[in-house]
Image (cartoon, rainbow, N blue to C red):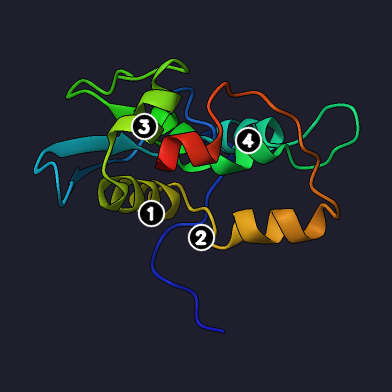
Amino acid sequence: MKMNDAPLADVSAMFPGKVRRRYLDIELPVAKITVRIRSLLAGEVSRFHASLLSKRNRKIIQSRLEDSTARLIVLCAVDANGTVLLNESHVLQIIEEWDNADVACLSDACTKHCGMDPDEFEDLAKNSGEISFASERSASPDSIAG
């Protein structure tokens, strides 16, 4: 196996004492606006995944899985200075007001930019066994679509 020319990391290089984020600008195909997204830290991704599971029985919470793309957008969208733009109150707003092509474009970009596997939500649902049906949103998927 051939080694690359990059120097071998030491502890100080691995933990430089500051958070390093990567940023990417994504143009939404329908809204025709550019949204800047940030990379997530490993702990943020772990907490995001944990938020999809019931604390009691470790099963997928259906409503959390349904709005997981919007939740990921909320975590990743930032302004020009890297400050998070959105919060929990925007999740339902994204689902109810954004064109799905824009949601799909941005959530796919967030997933890739954060080093997440695009199929991991499907895998998570398969590996969790039976999906628990915890209702955490006031609007049902049918009322949102109609």
Q: Are marks 3 and 1 in contact (CB under 8 Å)?
A: no
Q: Are marks 1 and 4 in contact (CB under 8 Å)?
A: no
**C-alpha separation, residue under disc 4 versus residue under disc 2:** 19 Å
Of tags 1 and 4, which is closer to the observer?
4
Pick whichever of labels 2 and 1 is earlier in the sequence: 1
What element does badge 1 sit on?
A: helix
Q: Are marks 2 and 3 in contact (CB under 8 Å)?
A: no
Kindly identify which residue carries mark 3.
96
The amino acid sitting under disc 4 is Ser
Pick whichever of labels 4 and 2 is earlier in the sequence: 4
- Mark number displayed over residue 63: 4
**C-alpha separation, residue under disc 3 versus residue under disc 4:** 14 Å
Q: Where residue 103 sits: x, y (%)?
A: 33, 45
Kindly identify which residue carries mark 1.
108
Q: Are marks 3 and 4 in contact (CB under 8 Å)?
A: no
Q: Are marks 2 and 1 in contact (CB under 8 Å)?
A: yes
**C-alpha separation, residue under disc 1 versus residue under disc 4:** 19 Å
Q: How many residues crowd mark 4 within 10 Å: few (<14), some (14–19), many (20+)?
A: some
Q: How many residues crowd mark 1 within 10 Å: few (<14), some (14–19), many (20+)?
A: some
Pick whichever of labels 3 and 1 is earlier in the sequence: 3
The amino acid sitting under disc 3 is Glu
Q: Where residue 125 sits: x, y (%)?
A: 72, 54
Q: In terms of depth relative to the viewer, which is nearer, 124 or 12?
A: 124
For the C terminus, the image quarter is top left
Kindly identify which residue carries mark 2.
118
What element does badge 4 sit on?
A: helix
The amino acid sitting under disc 2 is Pro
**C-alpha separation, residue under disc 2 versus residue under disc 1:** 7 Å
